[in-house]
Amino acid sequence: EVEVPESHPRYHSLLTRHRIEAGVEKGITSQQGLIAQGRGEAFDYLLGEETIPSADRAARAAAAALLRADQPVLSVNGNVAALVPEEMVELAEVVDADLEVNLFNRTEARIERITDHLREHGATDVKGLTADARIPGIDHERAKVDADGIYSADVVVVPLEDGDRAEALGEMGKTEIVIDLNPLSRSPQVASIPIIDNVLRALPNITDHAEELAGASGDELARIVDEFDPDEALQDAERRIRTASESGG
Ligand code: ATP
Ligand code: MG
């Protein structure tokens, strides 16, 4: 990784950019991933580059939903693999979930490279290459998932998912946890639990909540999930972004 002094005021943002660049160089992140990164950065700037309280409540609800799940699956794309491979592996371990590589611009080669990359960061079993099931209502290439992975999961975490697929997964009746910095994007708007936060902060935060909730009863976990209001979380994030832009950032 490129050296950025930690004292630099834009340290995290620069580090993130370098990781995405390195991901593109390694062939795990797509060119479109660079554009997605730029959009995310703009929203993060307006959110103050911090986890707002409503996003923290969403992360807690996500942890509860994952702990309560029968078959939770964490979806990994090229940006997620470049930015937070270790954090994905760690969350999967803590909530006993499977990891599945799931790409918008799917190629076998890129899935293999991401799978290897996740293994280098401690993953043992990575799904996504079997691709023996299809998400209903999505065009062929983008519909491909593993039958024993995302297809049959009851709870899915889809960071930075595309709007169409997020909607189709929701229609399959899954509890869908979306991490996305843009509260106006369709993906968080169709999620059961939208987390409006940077994946760099949101993933370790879900893991912390899951560790803290490890001893909670099924009833308590259910209550935490039920009490979470997705519309309120989206509105709160949007309000903060609009206020920040009115006051000049
Ligand atoms: P749609 O409305 O169909 O969802 P979109 O405008 O969201 O389309 P995408 O290219 O899928 O188009 O956008 C990528 C999304 O990923 C953006 O909403 C961006 O804010 C988000 N994003 C990018 N980087 C991060 C990150 N590090 N953490 C969280 N979200 C991110
Ligand atoms: Mg989107």
Image (spheres, rainbow, N blue to C red):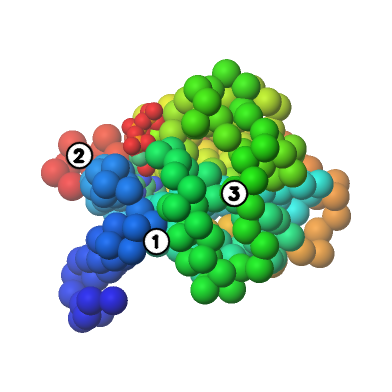
Q: Earlier in the sequence, mark 3 or mark 1?
A: 1
Q: Secondary structure at mark 3?
A: loop
Q: Earlier in the sequence, mark 1 or mark 2?
A: 1
Which residue type carries mark 2? Answer: Ser
248 vs 185, nearest the viewer: 185
Q: What's the residue at 78%, 43% (across, down)?
A: 222
In this rendering, position of residue 134 left or right of residue 36: right
Relative to 152, does residue 203 appear above or below in the rendering?
Answer: below
Mark 3 vs 2: CB contact within 8 A: no
In this rendering, position of residue 128 left or right of residue 55: right
193 vs 36, nearest the viewer: 36
- The percent position of residue 74, horizontal first and vertical second, equals 61, 51
Residue 82 badge: 1
Q: What's the residue at 49%, 31% (across, down)?
A: 141
Q: What's the residue at 29%, 42% (across, down)?
A: 32
Task: Specify whether residue 63 is in view.
Answer: no
Q: Estimate the spatial distance between the alpha carbons at disc 3 and disc 2, rounded to whole Å.
A: 43 Å
Quarter holding the N terminus is: bottom left
Question: Dot 2 corresponds to which residue?
Answer: 245
| Mark 3 Cα-neighbour bin, 10 Å: few <14, some 14–19, many ≥20 | some
**Which residue occupies the extreme top position in the image?**
137
The quadrant where residue 200 appears: bottom left
Which residue type carries mark 3? Answer: Leu
Question: Dot 3 corresponds to which residue?
Answer: 129
Relative to 24, does residue 103 appear above or below in the rendering?
Answer: above
